C-alpha cells in the first residue's frame, strides 16, 4: 500500500483496481471500489467520483462494462495469451530460474487476480534444466542492439566443464556478423557469419560471455554462402534442425504413413513425396547433412536414409559403433 492525496491519480488507481479485481466474469460495485481505494492506496473517494472517473476511462478507450457493477472486459493480453507467455518463459532454457520467476511475476501483473489464482501452481514447480550463464540475458540485449545497428560483435564461446562452469572453447574472442536471433529447442541461437569465412554459422547465446558490440559494420548477407538472397527464416530453420552449420543437401528417406506427420513437424510442408505404396513412403527433404545424421538416428526404428550414399554410409558406421558399445 502507498499513501497519496493526489486526486489527479484517481482514474489510474481505479483502472488498476479494475485490472486486478475484475474480468468478464467478475465485477465490483462502487462501494467495493471505494473500499479498495482506501485499503490499497489510502485514497478517499465517493460514489459520484468513482462513476465520473470510470466514464473518463471509457471515453479514453477502455472497455469497461457498467451495467451490473464495473468490470474491465478487455486488456492487452487475454488469459490464453498470458498462459502462452508464461509457459514460454517457464520452459526456456536460456534464462536462469530467478530471471524466469521475475519475468513470470511481471506477466502475471498484466492479469486479474482470478487468472493468477489459476496459475498459482507455476511458482511451485521444481527447478528446470536452465542455463548456468548469468550473463545470457545481457548478451541477448547486446546482440539485439548490434543487429539493429548492423554492427559486428565479439564474444568468448564456452563449453561446460565437469565442474559445471563455463570454460572458453578457444583462448580467443570470436568476431562475427550477426543477422538474426532464433529460438530452437528451448535455446536462443545467433544466426551469423564467422568473419574469417563466407558461410553461415550458429552460436548458442547461453554459451557466450563477454559479448560486445563493435563499431565495425556487418558483412552484407549477399556475400555469405546460403544467404545471397537474404534470410528465409522458416526455410532456414527447417533445414537446420539442431542448428548445425554447413551446407544443406537433398535427402531421400524411406518411411511409413504413420511417421509422415512427424516429418512435416520437423521439415515443414516443403517435403516432397516421391513414392507411395500402401503404408510405405519415399520422401525427399532438404536438410543440413550433419543434422540429418542425428535426426535419422533418433527416428532409426521407422526411417531409413537412402540418399546421399555418403550420409547413409556414415549412419551405418554410427550404428556399428553403437552396437560395439552395447555389446560390451
Image: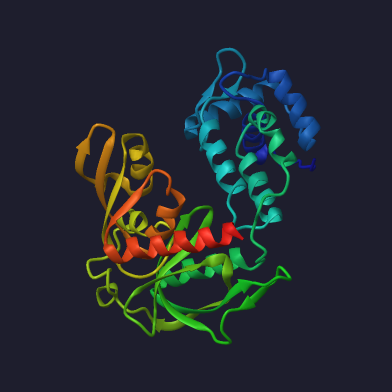
- Nearest the camera: 42 or 211? 211
- Left or right of 11: which side holds 155? left
Residue 73's spot in the image, x, y percent?
53, 25
* Quarter placement of the N terminus: top right
* Quarter placement of the C terminus: bottom right
- Left or right of 293: which side holds 23? right
Residue 129's spot in the image, x, y percent?
66, 53
Q: Quadrant of residue 126?
A: top right
- Left or right of 51: which side holds 143? left
Q: Please indicate, yes or no, whether residue 180 appears anywhere in the rendered image.
A: yes
Q: Please indicate, yes or no, whether residue 78 appears anywhere in the rendered image.
A: no
Q: Quadrant of residue 311?
A: bottom left
Q: Going 43% across and 48% down the picture, which residue do you hit?
A: 299
Q: Going 58% across and 87% down the picture, which residue do you hit?
A: 171
Most extreme residue toward the top is 68
- Nearest the camera: 94 or 34? 94
Q: Is residue 82 above or below residue 218?
A: above
Amino acid at each position: 500500500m502507498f499513501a497519496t492525496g493526489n486526486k489527479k491519480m484517481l482514474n489510474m488507481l481505479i483502472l488498476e483496481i479494475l485490472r486486478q479485481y475484475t474480468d468478464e466474469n467478475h465485477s465490483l460495485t462502487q462501494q467495493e471500489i471505494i473500499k479498495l481505494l482506501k485499503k490499497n492506496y489510502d485514497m478517499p473517494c465517493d460514489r459520484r467520483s468513482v462513476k465520473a472517473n470510470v466514464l473518463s476511462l471509457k471515453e479514453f478507450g477502455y472497455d469497461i462494462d457498467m451495467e451490473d457493477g464495473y468490470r474491465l472486459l478487455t486488456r492487452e493480453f487475454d488469459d490464453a495469451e498470458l498462459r502462452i507467455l508464461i509457459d514460454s518463459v517457464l520452459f526456456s532454457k536460456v534464462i536462469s530460474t530467478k530471471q524466469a520467476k521475475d519475468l513470470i511475476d511481471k506477466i502475471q501483473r498484466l492479469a486479474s487476480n482470478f487468472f493468477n489464482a489459476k496459475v498459482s501452481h507455476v511458482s511451485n514447480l521444481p527447478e528446470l534444466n536452465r542455463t548456468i550463464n548469468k550473463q545470457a540475458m545481457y548478451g541477448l540485449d547486446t546482440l539485439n542492439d548490434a543487429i539493429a545497428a548492423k554492427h559486428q560483435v565479439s564474444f568468448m564461446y564456452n563449453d561446460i566443464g565437469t565442474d559445471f562452469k563455463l570454460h572458453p572453447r578457444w583462448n580467443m574472442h570470436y568476431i562475427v556478423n550477426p543477422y538474426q536471433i532464433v529460438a530452437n529447442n528451448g535455446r536462443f541461437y545467433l544466426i551469423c557469419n564467422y568473419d574469417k569465412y563466407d558461410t553461415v554459422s550458429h552460436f548458442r547465446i547461453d554459451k557466450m560471455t563477454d559479448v560486445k558490440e563493435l563499431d565495425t559494420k556487418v558483412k552484407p548477407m549477399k556475400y555469405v554462402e546460403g544467404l545471397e538472397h537474404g534470410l528465409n527464416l522458416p526455410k532456414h530453420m527447417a533445414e537446420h534442425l539442431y542448428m548445425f552449420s554447413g551446407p544443406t543437401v537433398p535427402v531421400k528417406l524411406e518411411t511409413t504413413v504413420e511417421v509422415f506427420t512427424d516429418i512435416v513437424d520437423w521439415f515443414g510442408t516443403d517435403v516432397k513425396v516421391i513414392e507411395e505404396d500402401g503404408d510405405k513412403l519415399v520422401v525427399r527433404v532438404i536438410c543440413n547433412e550433419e543434422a540429418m545424421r542425428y535426426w535419422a538416428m533418433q527416428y532409426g526404428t521407422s526411417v531409413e536414409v537412402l540418399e546421399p550414399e555418403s550420409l547413409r554410409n556414415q549412419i551405418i558406421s554410427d550404428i556399428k559403433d553403437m552396437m560395439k558399445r552395447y555389446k560390451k
